[in-house]
Image: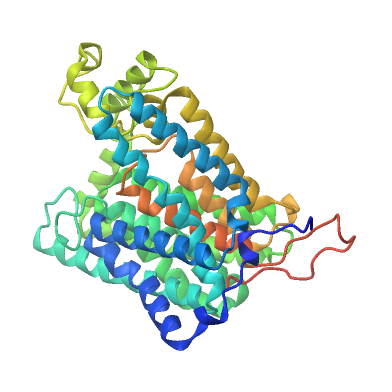
Amino acid sequence: MHSKRHDESKIMPTSDMKNNIQDYFIRLWVLSGVPLALIGNAASDIWLSVTAVFFLLYVFYTKQWFWAKIRWFQAAIALWAWMLIVSALSAWPANSLPESAAWIRFPVFALALPFIFHSFPGLFKQFVWAVILGLLFLILILILEKINNPDAVRLYGTWKQNTKIGWFLTGLGLPASYFLLSTIIDHKKHGLWALPLVSIFVLSVILTGEIYATVSFLFGLCLFIFGLFVFSNRINLKTVIGIIAGIGALISSATVAMLAFRPELAFRFYHSLTTRLPWMPSSDYFIPWMRGLKVGELNPFIGIGPKNYYAYCEKTADILAVGRGVCLPHPHQLYIQIWAEIGFIGLILSLIMIGFMFYKILQNRKLFALPLPVICALCLLITLFWPISTYSHAFGQHKNFFTWLGIAWAFYLAQSIKVYRPQKTDAPSTTNGSHIT
């Protein structure tokens, strides 16, 4: 038997997959993910799920199994199996099992999208520009909404019922910003249009009134700048300083204008920053977090089963005694919900899966000489999984769409350049990876 190493970036499409009709259809389907995400949760989840299903059908048909040997995916399979066991043992298996059974679509999607990007040259850039156009369209809707309702505390976007609008701007705007900033590093003149776009994305997140989406976006941008200084020895220092100065100048100018013409927006942002961060007792998220921790304390090892949080909260006096208010469907925090619903064992499996994701990104890389796409991928994963973060639902749709799209985006970036393999050669790869294509 051969001992040759394989990974998902090595899987090549067959000639049948490359005919013109299929090429057009697949490109159109991938690009349709952006307008479908603008429609809402259900539409974006359908796009994600169909993409995952077609990927499985294709690899089964072509008998390509290398993807099943990827460590983070093996950990995801183990986590999925544990979710099914916990659901079956829970007090409400009929409520929990469908949610657990369908969860596997997310890791499969994170395999599928990089595979498709690798299989169809140029599709990744087309997708990024579709994302940028979708963001600009959404921002226009938000501006019109604010003009029509100047006293609105939060904005809701396309259908005025889209409660994930801040996460749309962060979940898609942050990786798009990494792409735009990377183009500046390659071609400094691109800063004339790329820096204003990044600044528009940042200001639009602030405009939504969703403080934690704003904090996450700013954290991701700062992390990227930090990563350029620490993890790369091939990036021009003057270019990085220019990027920082450019973004700072544009955002500062917009902030001054906001203070001059709409001071209530600045007051709202300050109020949110000082009272509504999730770990603050005055925050809307504080009691759900405390109740989630209490659920985990009462069910430490196997949890109560995915999607059972609301039912358990309603029927448990010890949970209702924590704070005031009605029970919510979930604790609004990724790791707290994992512990509460699938226990300490499920939490450990989740952390193993996430750890292997980082391993996949950094595998065979020199940590302090990372190519630019790998820095982008690393910063994206850290922003997605940093521990003090709000979350919509750990096992269902909503923010999971943006989380797993970000994971897929990160995997593609990390696989888009050659890997330094010291066990095969003493010379490092000559590919500097300063472009994301």
Residue 108 rendering spot, x and y as whole percentages: 46, 54
Q: In this rendering, does residue 180 appear at all?
A: yes
Q: Residue at x 52, y 81 (%)?
A: 16
Q: Residue at x 79, y 66 (%)?
A: 429
Q: Could you tell whether 92 is left or right of 127 in the image?
A: left
* In-front residue for pair 72/257: 72
Question: Is residue 178 placed above or below 222 in the rendered structure?
Answer: below
> Looking at this rendering, what residue extends furthest in the bottom direction?
20
> Looking at this rendering, what residue extends furthest in the left direction?
148
Name the image colouring.
rainbow
Question: Is residue 13 placed above or below 350 in the rendered structure?
Answer: below
Residue 99 rendering spot, x and y as whole percentages: 31, 40
Q: In this rendering, does residue 392 appear at all?
A: no
Question: Is residue 101 placed above or below 222 in the rendered structure?
Answer: above
| Quadrant in which the C terminus is drawn | bottom right
Where residue 251 sits, quadrant-wise, is bottom left
Where residue 269 sits, quadrant-wise, is top left
Residue 231 rendering spot, x and y as whole percentages: 68, 53
> Looking at this rendering, what residue extends furthest in the right direction?
426
Q: Could you tell whether 379 is left or right of 24 in the image?
A: right
Give the mark count: 0
* In-front residue for pair 116/100: 100
| Quadrant in which the N terminus is drawn | bottom right
Where residue 44 sits, quadrant-wise, is bottom left
Question: Is residue 12 placed above or below 174 in the rendered structure?
Answer: below
* In-front residue for pair 103/403: 103
Residue 376 rendering spot, x and y as whole percentages: 57, 58
Q: Could you tell whether 197 is left or right of 437 in the image?
A: left
